Image (cartoon, helix red, strand yellow):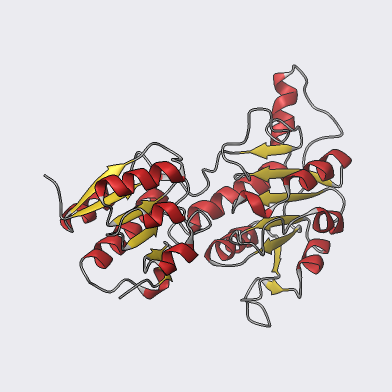
């Protein structure tokens, strides 16, 4: 039975718990293939006269926001809103929400797994065994305890990473201007990114992608790190300059890197970082554990149900207020 409201889901799947919330609010969910184009989202929004877009994968651009005169909310299935044209949403009176903290534990655990794999050289050790070799005196990894971890961004995910890193004996610092002047327990605040990079054996990225942060971790930052340090990015691909990272890896300035995100996703088949011997890559899965998917789906569905039924949306989830 069709509901009172039409919701576009920019992915082929949504957690059952989230679907239940939307059903109860009278919503019909229209699913899309993974990573739909902005044009495809706009076409579907116009055809079904969408009241809401639950944005998980792909772009929700100005054309998609303008396509349905009934559209009242774009709810992000996650934290980052770089794939949503927030200016267009504001201009059309469309609310934009996200789900802060919903996948923080999952992303933090993935980040620590990548750090451990890099420092312990798990990829090259495994490749050597696969090639028929055994112990190499030049390889074997380093101690994690005592290493200095620099967090580029220290919100819910960065702070969760800090807690896990402390359990392994790492010292943690961040240059996040949102931190108190004296930092937080277990997290020192440094004045700028250059200072953070110079004092970090591992630099881990946890800030949003904005025009100001695109290419933030570039050639100068990488050159300022201790030689042989490691870089991890589980935030957004555009924050780390991939060409600069490739050059730093080839030169040995960066000893290894781990990316869960790329500037273009999926990256082209012959992208030089796909099979670089010093790079460990995962396919943007850090925040998509079963528990995290339920948390994000439920929080996004709640925002849609509340908005469409005239109830108050939790203010901490609102990125753009939209019309009343």
Tell me which residue sits at (65%, 51%) in the image. Answer: 238
- Nearer to the camera, 282 or 114: 282
From the viewer's perspective, tell me whether residue 256 is left or right of residue 90. Answer: right
Coordinates of residue 292 in the picture (x, y in percent): 42, 51
From the viewer's perspective, tell me whether residue 304 is left or right of residue 253. Answer: left
Furthest residue to the bottom? 181
From the viewer's perspective, tell me whether residue 48 is left or right of residue 134. Answer: left
Q: Is residue 297 above or below residue 97?
A: above
Coordinates of residue 123 in the picture (x, y in percent): 70, 33
Q: Quadrant of the N terminus?
A: top left
Q: Quadrant of residue 207?
A: bottom right
Coordinates of residue 262 in the picture (x, y in percent): 62, 44
Coordinates of residue 34 in the picture (x, y in percent): 42, 38
Q: Quadrant of residue 177?
A: bottom right
- Nearer to the camera, 198 or 248: 248
Furthest residue to the left? 1
Q: Is residue 182 above or below residue 314?
A: below
How many marks do you count on the picture? 0
Q: Is residue 15 visible?
A: no
Tell me which residue sits at (65%, 44%) in the image. Answer: 259
Q: Quadrant of residue 256?
A: top right
Q: Is residue 319 visible?
A: yes
Tell me which residue sits at (74%, 55%) in the image. Answer: 202
């Amino acid at each position: 039975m069709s509901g009172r409201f039409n919701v576009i889901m920019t992915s082929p799947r949504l957690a059952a718990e989230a679907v239940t919330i939307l059903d109860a609010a009278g919503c019909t969910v229209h699913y899309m293939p993974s990573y739909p184009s902005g044009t495809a989202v706009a076409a579907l929004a116009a055809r079904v006269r969408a009241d809401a877009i639950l944005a998980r994968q792909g772009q929700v651009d100005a054309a998609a926001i303008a396509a349905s005169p009934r559209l009242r909310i774009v709810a992000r299935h996650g934290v980052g809103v770089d794939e949503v044209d927030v200016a267009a949403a504001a201009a059309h009176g469309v609310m934009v929400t996200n789900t802060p903290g919903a996948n923080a534990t999952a992303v933090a655990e993935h980040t620590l797994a990548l750090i451990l794999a890099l420092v312990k050289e798990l990829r090259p050790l495994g490749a050597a065994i696969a090639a028929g070799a055994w112990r190499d005196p030049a390889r074997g990894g380093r101690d994690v305890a005592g290493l200095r971890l620099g967090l580029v961004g220290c919100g819910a995910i960065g702070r969760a990473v800090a807690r896990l890193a402390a359990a392994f004996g790492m010292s943690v610092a961040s240059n996040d201007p949102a931190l108190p002047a004296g930092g937080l327990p277990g997290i020192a605040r440094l004045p700028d990114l250059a200072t953070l990079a110079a004092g970090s054996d591992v630099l881990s990225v946890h800030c949003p992608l904005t025009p100001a942060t695109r290419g933030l971790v570039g050639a100068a930052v990488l050159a300022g790190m201790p030689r042989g340090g490691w870089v991890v990015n589980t935030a957004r691909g555009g924050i780390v300059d991939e060409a600069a990272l490739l050059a730093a890896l080839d030169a040995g300035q960066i000893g290894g890197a781990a990316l869960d995100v790329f500037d273009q996703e999926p990256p082209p088949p012959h992208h030089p970082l796909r099979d670089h011997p010093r790079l460990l890559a995962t396919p943007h899965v850090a925040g998509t554990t079963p528990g995290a998917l339920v948390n994000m789906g439920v929080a996004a569905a709640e925002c849609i149900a509340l908005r469409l039924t005239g109830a108050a949306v939790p203010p901490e989830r609102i990125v753009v207020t939209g019309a009343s």
